[in-house]
Amino acid sequence: MAKSLRTISLNNYFKWLSVVKLHHFTTPDITLYSAGTPNGQKVSIALEELGIPYKAREISFKDNEQKQPWFLKINPNGRIPAITDHSRGDFHVFESGAIMIYLCEHYDPEEKLLPKDPNLRSQVIQWIMFQMGGLGPMQGQAIHFSKYAPEKILYAIKRYTDETKRLYSGLNSALEGKEYLVGNKFTLADAISFPWVREYFLADIPSIDEFPNLKAWVARISERPAVQKGLNVPTPDIVQEILDNPEKLNELVKRAQSVFKWKSVGEK
């Protein structure tokens, strides 16, 4: 690995020492392999909310690092994010939802993000599956076909944008009369969907005003200090910059197209 690791939040290390003493835990030594995408940000948000010391290693899509042999040993699927837990025998975990559950199972003795109560835990895991199987894939396709695809396929854009809005509607209904999705406190259920919903504008959805509970939820979570830290790992967050200056979106799209080089059917 040519690139160096960046240690995140020395304050987290000192905070964790008190947790180690109280609960007889091993001090975590974790490397996060990530990029500045919603899938990567989910995990860095969880790490920051848990106060776990970790090192961040940016994976360069431009250099196709996610497909290099050293990374495929960590994640055979060749996608970010992934972690290596050096404090547990260099144990590798890939898939963002699996990583978040793993972190809580081993490093959340205070039940900050994953309750031990069976019913509450089930509810949190249900929302994790909702994001992993629904919101992420559908919004991801909506973003791809509306912004990055080399040709505009109107049916695909409408299909995936409508499905994303349907999923937003489900979140909006679940948030009726509540600040957070489960137990009315911030958990993995919120952390896993938030980075995606805040990028609604990339999915050909100009506004989420029709989902007032969801809009308030996004604003509420955005104010959490640990969330702000997590959004800026491993690279500075650009969402607010794009919202303030729509021209930045065109730059982002062009940059992504040049990196991934998506082609139309029949192109070589």
Image (tube, rainbow, N blue to C red):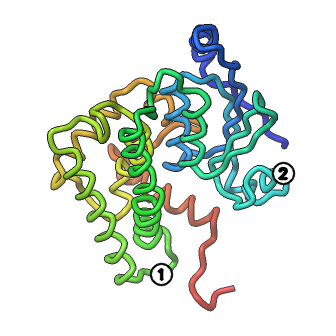
Q: Position of residue 112 (x, y in %)?
A: 44, 26
Q: Is residue 191 above or below residue 151?
A: above
Front disc: 1 or 2: 2
Q: Quadrant of residue 52?
A: top right
Q: Residue furthest bottom?
A: 266
The local crowd at label 2, few if under 14, some if 14 to 19, many if 20 or more residues have their Cα within 10 Å, is: few
**Judging from the image, what secondary structure is the residue with disc 2 in?**
helix
Q: Is residue 117 left or right of residue 209?
A: right
Residue under pointer 2: 70
User: Which residue is located at x 41 percent, y 45 percent?
Assistant: 122
Q: Is residue 13 left or right of residue 1?
A: left
Q: Is residue 143 left or right of residue 10?
A: left
Q: Position of residue 190 (x, y in %)?
A: 37, 41
- Name the one closer to the observer, 209 or 86: 86
Q: CA distance from mark 1 to mark 2?
A: 34 Å
**Judging from the image, what secondary structure is the residue with disc 1 in?**
loop
User: Which residue is located at x 69 percent, y 47 percent?
Assistant: 59
Q: Quadrant of residue 256?
A: bottom right
Q: Residue furthest front?
A: 118
The local crowd at label 1, few if under 14, some if 14 to 19, many if 20 or more residues have their Cα within 10 Å, is: few
Residue under pointer 1: 151
Q: Is residue 48 above or below residue 23?
A: below
User: Which residue is located at x 64 percent, y 62 percent?
Assistant: 259
Q: In the image, what residue type sits under mark 2?
A: Trp
Q: Position of residue 96 (x, y in %)?
A: 56, 48
Considering the image in quadrants, where does the C terminus appear? bottom right
Considering the image in quadrants, where does the N terminus appear? top right
Q: In the image, what residue type sits under mark 1?
A: Glu
